[in-house]
Image (tube, rainbow, N blue to C red):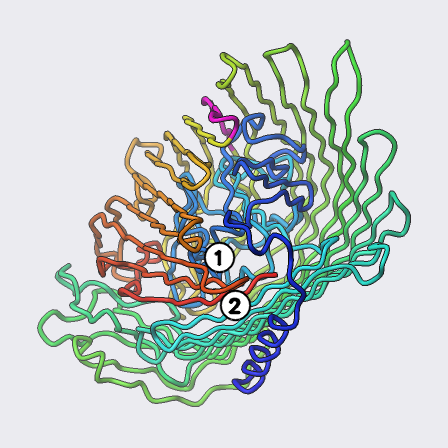
């Protein structure tokens, strides 16, 4: 989408705003957000407390769920201008965002990689935890984060977290909104969302969503351009049977991208002094990702409260990259001359396709004089991943790395990319869960998931075949110790198939173990305020532990790809979280995580993961002052450590905190203006030490938003 088209959209939306009929509630002084919204089995209500089916498939309140669940809703996404999922997860309690490169990000929770990502509760859990490019939030109503092992809904027991994106859906009443953004680093963005019935009876409903974003960067050479479009159509075939069709397309184009990060230490172990804008990239590099998804859904309301849902999902991800990887070598750059950093480049087209079929039924039954909830499901998914490789004909010498800002790598010639990998995964699973009403104050949640996984194919000449199966039980108990307090405990097995490879480029065997969690949950102020505290322990064997990066001389894997070894790791920790409306005007969400990670010998493990994190968000609204809203988001993490990806030299980063502020006001009927100031203190820190390299996070920046809602 070019600037002329984006401008045309903005003009069209402005004309639409002027021509729409007035609504009776438009003159009300109270905030107009927060009314009941039902989104695929999850409900957000005006109290700010949320029900969620993300953990068990059962429609339970957060207090009834024997795991830690966080919800980031549409209101917070809009208030803080969180236009991509990575920014959303920056605010999620217990989740650490590892921006290892400009266009590859991964996430950890409770010390482990988050590999389970779903849309409306459906996803293929054997995909990599690395996110290519950005996922735009314009498509989603909210994001649920279930911390701890979630074998029931994912089929695998990864003890980190499951991230569930809940789509926007066609609405029964007409609604429309549009936003325009502008900010630091030449950032600008427009988005629009229109939904409503297409016939008088309201039995046919549609929703159309679109966004365009462009921005430069504080990093040398880097810029991004993103287009997002989506359409959804819902039909009430009968009063009890609804069909929904949907399609989305996200086209993320990035130039001047980092592949790997900056070598961080000299050969003597001292830190290399970089500017915040430093990048080992070049203006001729790029990483383009086109992600398309289509789905069809049938939802049938049976007798009583029983319902059946069937979903078919198709995903097509095309990636095309010309990238440059820089390394300080086996000894690190010379501290006197700065020499020793060399680069290698390549062309890497890849094609990923995924097909998912999921059938699900839920409802309640009467037994022993009490009513119990049941959920049963079956799913089958298969995926193919095809990769090509075309290496550059020559390496690149960066010279004195201290003068990086004045060096621009010349573009080499590239060989025609040749097929290097073709891998197929197939995952079948059966799952079921029950919420048992054992007594007036005692409830139980039990479940089981059985999976069958088969992989075939080769990658860079190495056979990737595997065949795994497992049955994972889940059990939880909840006891109401007082009208507002519930004690809970839960247990599940860990059986986590891994995509990481070892030094021979073969996939590691599944990680196995156990996950235990116990805590207390409560709600107060007539349900407006929810709080929880938990202790947890997870043990895993054969867990992928980063060793290094293939460089063309140390193994058969592709240059720039990480390799791992299996290790035993125990994670123990405590979490506390609070969320809700203290008053009708004051919204609060936040929490603290303390973590300990150890290997078999009792030594610290996965040192790139901070042991202490704190996240807190608050907004306060004054309706009588034109809906004035003030807000803040605070994030803190303790010190982390790593080692250089080739020399093995130690790297350390001290703890740091960042503060974001917002101010918004209603400037006219249906129009709000918001200003977000990020990293107010201009903290300078490395985004992540996970891969033994890194780059600096963004400095202080500002984003202004003008939002129209009808």
What is the number of the mark on residue 78? 1
Provide residue 626's location: percent of width, then percent of height: 43, 56
Question: In the rendered image of this protein, does residue 587 appear above or below residue 65?
Answer: below
Lateral position of residue 114 relative to residue 664, left or right? right
Q: Is residue 521 magenta?
A: yes
Residue highlighted by disc 2: 179
Q: Looking at the image, which is closer to me, 248 or 117?
A: 248
Label 2 CA crowd tier, 10 Å (few <14, some 14–19, many 20+)? many
Answer yes or no: is residue 545 visible: yes
Answer yes or no: is residue 386 visible: no
For image coordinates 47% across by 30% down, the residue present is 530
Cβ atoms under marks 1 and 2 closer than 8 Å: yes
Q: How far is the residue under mark 1 from the one under mark 2? A: 10 Å
Lateral position of residue 649 relative to residue 357, left or right? left
Question: In the rendered image of this protein, does residue 534 appear above or below residue 211?
Answer: above
The N terminus, quarter of image? bottom right
Please tell me whether mark 2 sits on a helix, a strand or a loop: strand
The C terminus, quarter of image? bottom right
Provide residue 639's location: percent of width, then percent of height: 23, 46
> Which segment did they paint magenta?
513-527
Provide residue 541's location: percent of width, then percent of height: 47, 36
Please tell me whether mark 1 sits on a helix, a strand or a loop: helix
């Amino acid at each position: 989408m070019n600037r002329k088209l984006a401008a045309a959209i903005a003009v069209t939306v402005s004309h639409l705003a002027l021509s729409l009929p007035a609504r009776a509630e438009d003159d009300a002084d109270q905030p107009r957000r927060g009314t009941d919204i039902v989104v695929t089995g999850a409900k957000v209500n005006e109290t700010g407390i949320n029900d969620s089916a993300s953990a068990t498939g059962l429609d339970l309140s957060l207090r009834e769920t024997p795991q830690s669940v966080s919800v980031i809703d549409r209101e917070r996404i809009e208030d803080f201008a969180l236009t991509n999922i990575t920014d959303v997860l920056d605010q999620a309690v217990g989740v650490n965002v590892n921006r290892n490169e400009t266009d590859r990000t991964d996430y950890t929770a409770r010390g482990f990689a988050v590999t389970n990502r779903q849309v409306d509760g459906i996803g293929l859990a054997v995909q990599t935890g690395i996110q290519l490019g950005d996922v735009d939030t314009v498509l989603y109503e909210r994001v649920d984060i279930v911390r701890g092992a979630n074998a029931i809904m994912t089929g695998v027991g990864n003890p980190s977290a499951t991230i569930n994106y809940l789509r926007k859906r066609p609405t029964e009443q007409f609604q429309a909104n549009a936003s325009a953004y502008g900010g630091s680093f030449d950032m600008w963005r427009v988005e629009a969302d229109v939904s409503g019935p297409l016939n008088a009876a309201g039995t046919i409903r549609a929703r159309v969503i679109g966004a365009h974003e462009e921005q430069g960067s504080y990093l040398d050479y880097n810029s991004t351009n993103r287009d997002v479009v989506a359409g959804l159509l819902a039909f009430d075939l009968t009063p009890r049977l609804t069909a929904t069709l949907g399609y989305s397309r996200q086209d993320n184009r990035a130039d001047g991208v980092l592949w790997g990060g900056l070598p961080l230490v000299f050969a003597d172990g001292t830190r290399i002094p970089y500017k915040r804008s430093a990048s080992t990239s070049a203006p001729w590099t790029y990483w383009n990702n086109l992600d398309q998804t289509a789905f069809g859904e049938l939802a049938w309301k049976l007798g009583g409260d029983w319902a059946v849902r069937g979903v078919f999902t198709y995903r097509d991800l095309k990636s095309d990259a010309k990238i440059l990887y820089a390394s300080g070598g086996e000894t690190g750059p010379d501290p006197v001359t700065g020499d020793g950093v060399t680069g290698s480049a390549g062309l890497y087209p890849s094609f990923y396709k995924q097909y998912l079929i999921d059938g699900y039924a839920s409802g309640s039954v009467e037994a022993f004089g009490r009513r119990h909830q049941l959920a049963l499901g079956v799913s089958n998914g298969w995926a193919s991943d095809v990769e090509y490789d075309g290496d550059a004909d020559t390496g690149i010498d960066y010279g004195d790395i201290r003068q990086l800002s004045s060096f621009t790598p010349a573009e080499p010639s590239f060989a025609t990319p040749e097929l290097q990998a073709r891998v197929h995964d197939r995952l079948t699973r059966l799952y079921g869960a029950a919420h048992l009403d054992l007594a007036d104050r005692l409830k139980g949640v039990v479940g089981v998931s059985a999976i069958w996984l088969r992989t075939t194919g080769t990658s860079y000449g190495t056979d990737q075949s595997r065949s795994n199966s497992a049955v994972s039980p889940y059990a939880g108990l909840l006891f109401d110790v007082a009208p507002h307090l519930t004690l809970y405990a839960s247990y599940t097995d860990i059986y986590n198939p891994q995509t990481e490879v070892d030094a021979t480029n073969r996939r590691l065997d599944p990680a196995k173990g156990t996950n235990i969690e116990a805590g207390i949950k409560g709600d107060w102020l007539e349900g407006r305020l929810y709080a929880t505290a938990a202790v947890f322990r997870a043990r895993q064997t054969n867990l992928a532990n980063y060793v290094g990066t293939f460089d063309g001389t140390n193994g058969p894997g592709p240059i720039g790809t990480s390799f791992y070894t299996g290790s035993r790791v125990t994670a123990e920790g405590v979490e506390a979280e609070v969320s809700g409306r203290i008053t009708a005007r004051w919204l609060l969400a936040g929490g603290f995580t303390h973590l300990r990670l150890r290997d078999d010998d009792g030594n610290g493990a996965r040192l790139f993961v901070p042991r202490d994190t704190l996240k807190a968000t608050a907004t306060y609204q004054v309706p009588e002052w034109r809906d004035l809203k003030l807000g803040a988001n605070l994030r803190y993490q303790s010190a982390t450590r790593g080692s250089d990806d080739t020399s093995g030299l130690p790297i350390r980063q001290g703890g740091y905190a960042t503060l974001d502020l917002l101010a918004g006001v209603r400037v006219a009927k249906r129009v709000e203006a918001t200003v977000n100031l990020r990293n107010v203190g201009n903290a300078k820190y490395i985004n992540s030490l996970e891969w033994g390299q890194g780059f600096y996070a963004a400095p202080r920046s500002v984003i202004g938003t003008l939002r129209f809602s009808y």
